[in-house]
Amino acid sequence: MRHVLVLLLVTVLVLGGAWWIQHLVGAVTVQAGSYIIQAPLSVAVLSVLLFAALIYAVYRVLDALFGLRHVARGFNARGARRKGEQAVTQTLVALAAREGQTAKQQVQRARQYLGDTPQTLLLAASAGTMAGDQVYATEAFEKLSVHRDGAFLGLRGLLSQAVAREDWVRASDLARQAEKVRPGAGWLRSERSDYAARTGDWQEALLLNRDAAPHAALAAAAAEAESDPARALKLAKDAFKRDPGLAAAGLAYARRLRESGSEKSAQDVLRKTWARSPQPDVAAMALAPSADRLARLKAGQALVRDAAESADSHFLLARLSLEAGLLDDARREAIAAERAGLKQRRLYLLMADIADAAGDDDTHKFAAREALKRAAMAEPDSVWHCGACGSALGAWQPACPNCHAVGRVRWTAPQAEVLAA
């Protein structure tokens, strides 16, 4: 029905137009040199309409035969592409010459002719970075990050910017997105682990870590940060099993055992830890439940049972004996520590304290002075050191705050650490 109505409307319009043309009054005269053409106005209008219809018909025929519109569009497109490619080349030249502003101008032309393709956006980001225009570079990277074919490049660029700003939270998020886009990029997992460690997200770092070396340190740190006691105990146990010589692992495991009410198991862990890594924090934790001085000495003797002949064990017993007032035992243990190889300042200071406690007579005063002289020339005491960069730290940390190496902080003497590095 609709087609019939349209046909009737067109018929009415055609008839109306014909009637209007037929009743036009007047004439049209055209003179070209000595030639004069005169026709009624209605004939002239009809001739113009017929001529226009003829031109349109010829155009459609030629368009069908030769594709004139496509030829014209193709010609324009080729011209734009040629200009765009020239602009890309000029951008590359400017980047090679480290002319950031020129590169920005040329890449803007390239984007006008070629559009925001992965290539032009990457060049725009490079030009913005070289020109010091981080806003321009970020805008290009962000557009590139949502491009179907260039998402990884955009995310990688934004990741580099976040690292340069030391925005580790943002860097971690971008690395996670980049890994989803390109799961085969194994270096991203290592980067994510590093960013997690820098932000103190030890559980994330532990999950991402594939290197067995720092696993115990990360597990110990994760155990300390874990709020769920059962989960914390499991992490600490894993850290201790992987590296019984890591004092932080033994301390974390013993602390969680103590919190769960297993004091005997906690002391067993501390004794095993001391045998591999005699360190003051281990002794302090083992002695914490004993308030009486004699009880502390007895707890110390139990702690060093598996390494009774080590220099650090003798030193600990010498100190505890001095605190308990057993000066002969303290002196004997201090001498034993020196014979076992301990030549550090702390031992000779302890010997001076023992001599002072023994009396004010000349013999003991002389012994105290001699011990202090030896302390001045003694080896430096053991401290927390990073085995990667050699930095001395005030306390154990899972990652060195200076070089960010994970699992390299150990309790050692500075000279020994330098030799090990």
Image (spheres, rainbow, N blue to C red):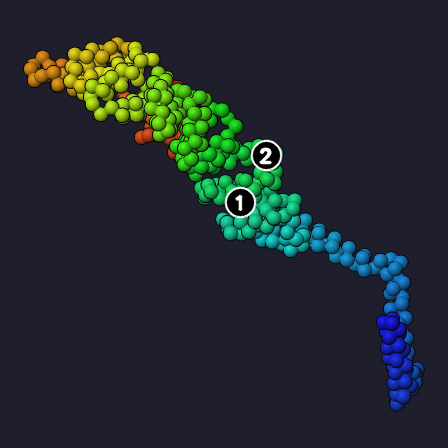
Q: Which mark is residue 230?
A: none
Answer above or below: position of 410 versus 362. below
Answer above or below: position of 183 versus 92. above
**Does 73 sit left or right of 118 as displayed?**
right
Instruction: Name the quadrant containing residue 321.
Output: top left
Q: Label 1 sits on what residue type?
A: Leu
Residue that mark 1 sits on: 158
Residue under the image location 88 percent in, 83 percent down: 16
> What whole-number distance in Å separates the C-alpha atoms at marks 1 and 2?
16 Å
Regarding residue 109, the answer to whether it shows in the image is yes
**Does 158 sit left or right of 72 as displayed?**
left
Q: Label 2 sits on what residue type?
A: Ala
Percent from the top left, x then y, of residue 223?
A: 41, 31
Residue under the image location 19 percent in, 12 percent down: 329
Element under disc 1: helix
Quadrant showing the C terminus? top left
Near mark 1 (Cα within 10 A), the count class, few <14, some 14-19 or many ≥20, is many
Residue under the image location 50 percent in, 26 percent down: 211
Q: N-terminal of the two: label 1 or label 2?
A: 1
Residue that mark 2 sits on: 185
Percent from the top left, x then y, of residue 213?
A: 47, 24
Answer above or below: position of 70 versus 404. below
Question: Which sits in the foreground, 182 or 282?
Answer: 282
Residue under the image location 23 percent in, 21 percent down: 296
